[in-house]
Image (tube, grey):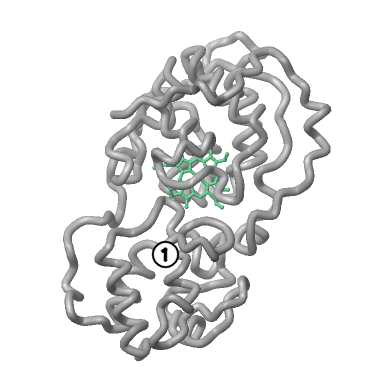
């Protein structure tokens, strides 16, 4: 696996200029992100696992809190045990460890926060955090990723290292599916929306419920304006259809590629494009 150098990341070990960073303007990285509140926020003060947890609490719980668990990742309860030496759940990350003690550059957790691009999109999805927060994570990992509370000096809160939420990873970008030649909405719904968009995000109660892509998706997208402007689906014209543009990470989109984990493989893009080109029939 490719190792990243961390040459570009300025380490501020022990040098906290938190106060100077408090006044950062709120980042508005795009319409998608406004519903998630102000992620990408302020610098956390401190170091060690306690500070890491504060970073998670302020920037990640909206999607990785207990019971939300996007990306099959719970950063709220028993988070340390679920991170250290545990392979990432997302099958496209090839079993890389979320946290590899002593080696932040090899850790998916750091790589996503630092936006190296090696493991899909940046976390949080709206915009990278303040560098000080990213460095808290790097320093914690490089110092051995101890789950001890920094202040207490006691033993850790019983990380039994128990469940590695392993590679159950739902749908992946596996083999070509049965739609080949059948560019129907049924296939778009089941192979794209149901398989990758709804769970925890584009559904009632999800973090982006505004665009509900569950069973009622057709009426919500066909010739319906997106919050960014262009229609979600413009019949017969993929390159004017915002959903297609988001899937292909077109330079005109706001926010991130969809899904966050990175572009779906060509066959899925082909399905969307073929269906739209056929007039997007219901
Ligand atoms: C707006 C929602 C959202 C926020 C906020 C968010 N994430 Fe994520 N995260 C996701 C989604 C969706 C995925 C699955 C796609 C992917 O792997 O990029 C994910 C995946 C991940 C993964 C890979 C998990 C695995 O096992 O494959 C890591 C690590 C991660 N996030 C860390 C973070 C951290 C750390 C923060 C806060 C600093 C954060 N995320 C904030 C939505 C979010």
- Horizontal arrangement in the rendering, residue 90 relative to residue 102 (left or right): left
* Image location (x, y in percent) of residue 3: 36, 25
The structure residue drawn at horizontal position 45% and vertical position 80%, both measured from the top left corner, is 217
The structure residue drawn at horizontal position 51% and vertical position 44%, both measured from the top left corner, is 122
* Image location (x, y in percent) of residue 257: 47, 58
Other residues around mark 1 within 10 Å, as few (<14) / some (14–19) / many (≥20)? many
Which residue corresponds to mark 1? Answer: 247
Q: How many marks?
A: 1
The structure residue drawn at horizontal position 59% and vertical position 30%, both measured from the top left corner, is 134
**Rendering quarter of residue 214:** bottom left
Q: Is residue 136 above or below residue 233?
A: above
Of residues 2 and 261, the one drawn nearer to the viewer in this rendering: 2
* Image location (x, y in percent) of residue 278: 31, 88
- Horizontal arrangement in the rendering, residue 222 relative to residue 135 (left or right): left
Of residues 277 and 66, the one drawn nearer to the viewer in this rendering: 277
The structure residue drawn at horizontal position 29% and vertical position 67%, both measured from the top left corner, is 268
- Horizontal arrangement in the rendering, residue 261 relative to residue 79 (left or right): left
**Does the residue tagged 1 have its C-beta within 8 Å of any atom of ligand 1?**
no
Location of the C terminus by quadrant is bottom left
* Image location (x, y in percent) of residue 45: 72, 24
Of residues 114 and 34, the one drawn nearer to the viewer in this rendering: 114
**Rendering quarter of residue 132:** top right
Location of the N terminus by quadrant is top left
Q: At numbered mark 1, what does the secondary structure look like: helix, strand or loop?
A: helix
């Amino acid at each position: 696996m490719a190792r990243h150098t961390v040459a570009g990341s300025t380490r501020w070990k022990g040098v906290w200029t938190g106060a100077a960073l408090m006044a950062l303007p709120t980042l508005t990285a795009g319409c998608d992100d406004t519903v998630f509140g102000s992620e990408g926020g302020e610098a956390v003060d401190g170091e060690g696992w306690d500070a890491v947890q504060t970073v998670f609490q302020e920037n990640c719980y909206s999607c990785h809190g207990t019971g939300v668990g996007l990306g099959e990742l719970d950063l709220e309860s028993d988070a340390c045990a679920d991170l250290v030496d545990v392979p990432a759940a997302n099958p496209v990350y090839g079993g890389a460890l979320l946290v590899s003690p002593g080696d932040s550059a090899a850790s998916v957790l750091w790589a996503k926060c630092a936006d190296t691009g090696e493991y899909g999109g940046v976390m949080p999805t709206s915009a990278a955090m303040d560098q000080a927060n990213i460095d808290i994570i790097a320093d914690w990992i490089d110092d051995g990723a101890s789950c001890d509370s920094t202040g207490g000096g006691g033993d850790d809160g019983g990380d039994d290292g128990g469940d590695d939420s392993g590679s159950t990873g739902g749908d992946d970008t596996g083999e070509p599916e049965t739609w080949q030649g059948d560019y129907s909405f049924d296939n778009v719904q089941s192979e794209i929306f149901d398989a990758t968009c709804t769970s925890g995000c584009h559904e009632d109660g999800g973090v982006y419920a505004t665009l509900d892509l569950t069973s009622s998706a057709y009426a919500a997208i066909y010739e319906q304006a997106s919050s960014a402007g262009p229609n979600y689906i413009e019949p017969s014209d993929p390159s004017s259809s915002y959903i297609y543009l988001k899937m292909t990470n077109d330079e005109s989109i706001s926010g991130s590629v969809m899904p966050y984990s990175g572009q779906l493989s060509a066959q899925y893009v082909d399905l969307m494009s073929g269906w739209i080109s056929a007039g997007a029939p219901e």
